[in-house]
Image: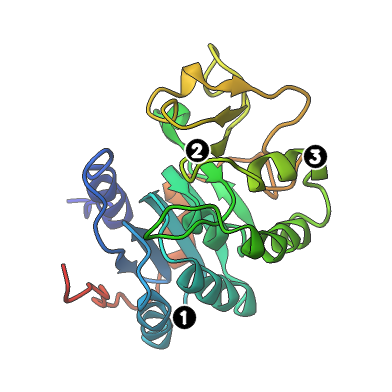
């Protein structure tokens, strides 16, 4: 009897939480792939580092994360970049989650029947308590994204995403053609994020031309299985004791 696809089961579990209240980030391992979902917390850099020490990691799959602690996102991004790990995304990956995604050597979207529900969201930093836009933190993030995209991210588009008026304003990037009724890039202001078809469509660019994805080729879960075949499965979950 064929063994159930562990990666597919883990990804299905993470998608179960779509639309649920944000919880601390969970880190699940299947051989040399880590699946991360949930809210990014301040101690997640150390938890991610412990997962790396448990065995080699070639791929990080990010899914269903509203973002969270910016410092932890930068810390995890540096670890991903330093170890030349590939990243992939399925479902929502917003704010700090998108920063972590952008650290991948190869950055792809997972092939899915619900590809229209996969989206990366970028916006300027803001204070977690007051929700005031943190203009002094924008230059660092802006420069980081320009470097990550090798200068492909058009500066006028980047400035629109960074210099927001409200903390919930966000620029969303979809896979080209995934949602045939709306554009591939949308800028959502406060109150429209829950219904992105009400957001403003931005023409002339897509997620590949601006350098967010390194390739238009979608990643199949089976490819991850092929990459991990023969690896040693490690039960480390990195679950946060505060959950």
The reply to whether residue 47 is in sight is: yes
Q: Is residue 128 above or below residue 167?
A: below
Name the residue carrying label 2.
Answer: 119
Sooner in the amino-acid sequence: mark 1 or mark 3: 1
Categorize mark 1 by other alpha carbons within 10 Å: few (<14), some (14-19), many (20+): some
Percent position (x, y) of residue 71? 50, 73
**Residue that lies at the very extreme toward the bottom in this rendered image:** 53
Please give the label number shown on residue 26: none
Residue positioned 40% across, 29% down in the render: 114
Callout 2: helix, strand or loop? strand
Sooner in the amino-acid sequence: mark 2 or mark 1: 1
Please give the label number shown on residue 156: 3
Callout 1: helix, strand or loop? loop
Percent position (x, y) of residue 83? 60, 79
Q: Quadrant of residue 158?
A: top right
Would residue 13 be found to the left or right of residue 73 on screen? left
Please give the label number shown on residue 56: 1
Q: Is residue 112 above or below residue 74?
A: above
Distance Cα–Cα, label 2 vs label 1: 28 Å
**Quarter of the C terminus within the rendering:** bottom left
């Amino acid at each position: 009897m064929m063994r159930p696809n562990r990666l597919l089961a883990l990804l299905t579990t993470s998608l179960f939480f779509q639309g649920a209240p944000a919880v601390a980030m969970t880190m699940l391992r299947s051989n040399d792939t880590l699946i991360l979902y949930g809210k990014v917390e301040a101690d997640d850099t150390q938890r991610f580092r412990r997962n790396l020490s448990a065995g080699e990691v070639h791929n990080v799959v990010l899914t269903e994360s509203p973002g969270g602690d910016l410092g932890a996102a930068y810390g995890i991004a540096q670890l991903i970049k330093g170890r030349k790990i590939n990243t992939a995304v399925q479902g929502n990956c917003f704010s700090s989650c998108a920063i972590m995604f952008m650290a991948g050597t190869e950055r792809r979207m997972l092939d899915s029947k619900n590809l229209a529900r996969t989206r990366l969201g970028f916006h300027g930093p803001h204070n977690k308590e007051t929700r005031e836009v943190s203009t002094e933190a924008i230059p660092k993030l802006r420069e980081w994204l320009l470097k990550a995209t090798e200068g492909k991210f058009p500066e006028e588009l980047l400035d629109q995403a960074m210099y927001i008026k409200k903390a919930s304003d966000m620029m969303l990037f979809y896979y080209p053609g995934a949602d045939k009724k709306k554009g591939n890039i949308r800028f959502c202001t406060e109150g429209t994020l829950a219904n992105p078809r009400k957001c403003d469509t931005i023409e002339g660019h897509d997620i590949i031309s601006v350098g967010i994805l390194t390739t238009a080729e979608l990643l199949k879960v089976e490819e991850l299985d092929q990459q991990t075949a023969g690896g040693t499965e490690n039960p480390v979950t990195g679950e946060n004791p505060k959950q």
